[in-house]
Amino acid sequence: MARVVRFSEETAREAAKAVREGSLIVYPTDTLYAVGCDPANEGAVANVFRAKGRGSSPLPVLCDSTETAGRLVDLGGTAADLAARFWPGALTIVRPLTAKLPEALHQGTGWLGVRVPASKRCVGLVRDCGGSLVGTSANLSGEPTARTAAEAAAMLPVGVELYLDGGTLEGAPSTVVRVEEGRITVLRQGRVRVGENP
């Protein structure tokens, strides 16, 4: 049975072990509570979609550093400038994949949203998980986002092994931008403000 536990170094290690073994966790980021799994594990990625009742939207990935993110996607040019300006922080940058990852993760687009969170404890957890961790909001698709671990557990009672309780979060999502040929398109305006290219 899934457990809700206080976020600590010990429980973070336990959560990271669960992720490495192919399980799902719920954890606090610097923005919202997120459902996490190993982004390279095809079965775990499929289980995220099942747990959320989510259909066809790609899943974002949190990374422990800009260098790690750059091993997953092409972070050159304008994307690199955005990363230098806003990371760590609440900006998800969607760029072409350079790593081989499950098709369900990016829904066959060949593009992936990545970011480095501002929360040190979150970055530590991501590092313990191998440097990257799926970071989609911990809620049923179409429902309000969870601001506490208890809210997440009530919405996602099946499929998650461990819920890390990090207190009440602000609840403002990250801003999501797609960078293509130097042009910035805002896909979701969130906590940070980024202007589009004309």
Image (tube, rainbow, N blue to C red):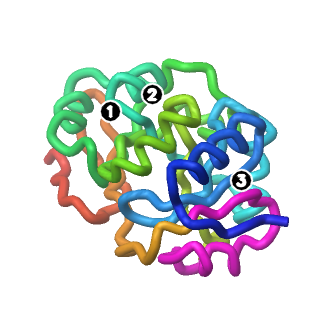
Category of crowding for the residue at label 2, using alpha-carbon neighbours closer than 10 angstroms: few (below 14), some (14–19), many (at least 20): some
Residue 142 vertical position relative to residue 115 in the rendered view, above or below: below
SS type, badge 1: strand
Which quadrant holds residue 50? bottom right
Tell me where residue 44 appears, x and y as whole percent: 76, 43
Residue occupied by mark 1: 180
Q: Amino acid at mark 3?
A: Val
Q: CA distance from mark 3 to mark 1?
A: 28 Å
Task: List the residue tagged with mark 2.
Answer: 96
Q: Position of 69 compared to 45: left or right?
A: left
Residue 179, image x, y percentages: 31, 37
Q: Is residue 157 magenta?
A: yes
Tell me the kind of residue under disc 1: Glu
Q: Earlier in the sequence, mark 2 or mark 3?
A: 3
Amino acid carrying label 2: it is Pro
Category of crowding for the residue at label 1, using alpha-carbon neighbours closer than 10 angstroms: few (below 14), some (14–19), many (at least 20): some
Q: Which mark is residue 48?
A: 3
Which contiguous range is marked in magenta?
A: 143-164
At horizontal 58% and vertical 62% (from top left) the residue drawn is: 164
Q: CA distance from mark 2 to mark 3?
A: 22 Å
Q: Quadrant of residue 96?
A: top left
Q: CA distance from mark 1 to mark 2?
A: 9 Å
